[in-house]
Image (cartoon, grey):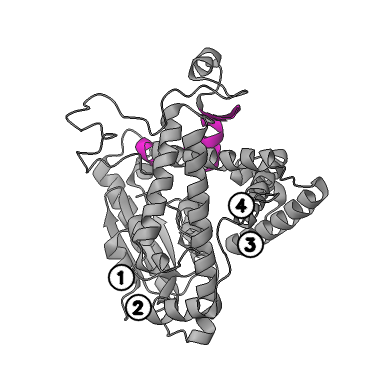
Amino acid sequence: MILRPAHLFALLLLLASCSANPGNSSNPSNPSNASNPSNPSQTISCLPPGFRCAPGCVSPAQVAEIKGEELDVILGVVEGQVITKRRLLREVGGLAPGQDPSTLERQIGAALLSRARLLVFVKEAQRNEVVVRDAYLEDFVEERLDLAVEEASETLGTPVTVDDYLRDKGVTMDEYREQQRELMQYRAYVVKLAQGLGGPTRPQVDMEVTPSEVRHIYWSHPGAFDEKAGVRFAVFPLSVEKYLVDEDTGFLEAEEDANEDAEAIAALLRQGQTPEAVAARHGLEADVDWMASPEETFADEGSEMLIRMIRQEPHDWLFDPSRSQGDATVFSEANGPLVVTVLERRQGRRIPYEEAYEAVVGMVRHVREQRLVEQRLIEILSTRNVVQPPALASALLRQARQRIAEIDGDPLYAAARFR
């Protein structure tokens, strides 16, 4: 089991990313389902028929023409801006040692949807004259980089430079600067969208949250805003494949070597040594061979994301009431042993109404904003041909509709009434 830190601890923070669902394969009556007997060979596009490519947009035929063996693979185009596989590969970090190529392809697919979605809104922001001043952008980039480098240095326990950080992210300074410009344009556009897009346009959603709404949501959902039990932990996934050093090494021998190292690592952790010290002793590279949750970042008990990452059994072990700081154990996985250790525990506690007030307000505003954004994306994709190929536009539409359905189907989020 290969765990990538960028997809583990960052996603265990306050916001969890929604995964792209290309279709409802479990519903045979869905016309977009390729397994539908009435539609055995094709998937119906979510886009209205008869669209013509917008000015500046590269058509599928043009995409095919500019592809070549020496050129990068084009996966999508948003109003003329090309999304290449090479860029997405850098964003997801490429194929990790021992990683299943199919897992990498899924990561690229998710990154493609995320990139295309962002570009749709960036183009909308530009169309609505949302401008980010260069001076403000430079200050923002400098602040973000300083903070990121500081956090990386604290996590690794060694000084990290800006160049080190950008190299690890696989981007140049110019690319990083442009990423931040796009994110700022997106945020500014969302704010403008909520307030009304200029002129006499009225606000789409009332973002003001009244005290009566807060009281209703808090008391109607007991425990929803309580602080759950949490844990900070470190994991050492040891792939048997890395122990197949030469042709003379058999699988059973490599598996035995991996298990021996796993038990040795667990013993050192139980003796009180830090994950950093243990990794240095065994020559393990941070964020590749091992990883630890950052300071003050606790995974909640029952987190579906955490369970998907490390499986149910390690999750249950971490949150066993008898666990204490420094405990470590080894789990047998398909790809090799997994060492798990407890760095810090946080007890759950009841959050009183007064303390939870701002959290409730923030939740309501966030849900209203998210629903507004998804509705706007559906409107754009359903009325204008801005994304190519059509399959990518259809996937974005399905994702947006799924996210709205998830909001409406959640009792707590559905309580955040849209006024």
Residue 151, numbered label: 3
Dividing the picture into quadrants, the one containing residue 167 is: top right
- Residue that numbered label 4 is attached to: 193
Residue interval drawn in magenta: 76-103
N-terminal-most mark, 3 or 1? 3
Q: Position of residue 349 (x, y in %)?
A: 43, 84
Label 3: which secondary element = helix
N-terminal-most mark, 2 or 1? 1
Label 4: which secondary element = helix
| Residue situated in front as seen by the camera: 4 or 64 | 64
Residue 284 visible in image: no
How far apart are the alpha carbons under marks 3 and 1? 28 Å
Residue 95 inside the magenta-drawn segment = yes
- Residue that numbered label 2 is attached to: 323
Q: Is residue 133 left or right of residue 283?
A: right
Marks 2 and 4: which is nearer the front? 4
Farthest residue, direction right: 135
Compared with residue 37, is residue 205 higher up or lower down, i.e. above or below?
below
Dividing the picture into quadrants, the one containing residue 176 is: top right
Marks 1 and 4: which is nearer the front? 4
- Local packing at callout 1 (Cα closer than 10 Å; few below 14, some 14-19, many 20+) is some
Residue 317, numbered label: 1
Farthest residue, direction top: 65
Task: Please state which amino acid type lies under the numbered disc 4.
Answer: Leu
N-terminal-most mark, 4 or 3? 3
Task: Please state which amino acid type lies under the numbered disc 2.
Answer: Arg
- Local packing at callout 3 (Cα closer than 10 Å; few below 14, some 14-19, many 20+) is some
The residue positioned 41% from the left and 76% from the top of the image is 228
Look at the numbered discs 2 and 4 and tell me whether their residues touch, using CB distance below 8 Å. no
N-terminal-most mark, 3 or 2? 3
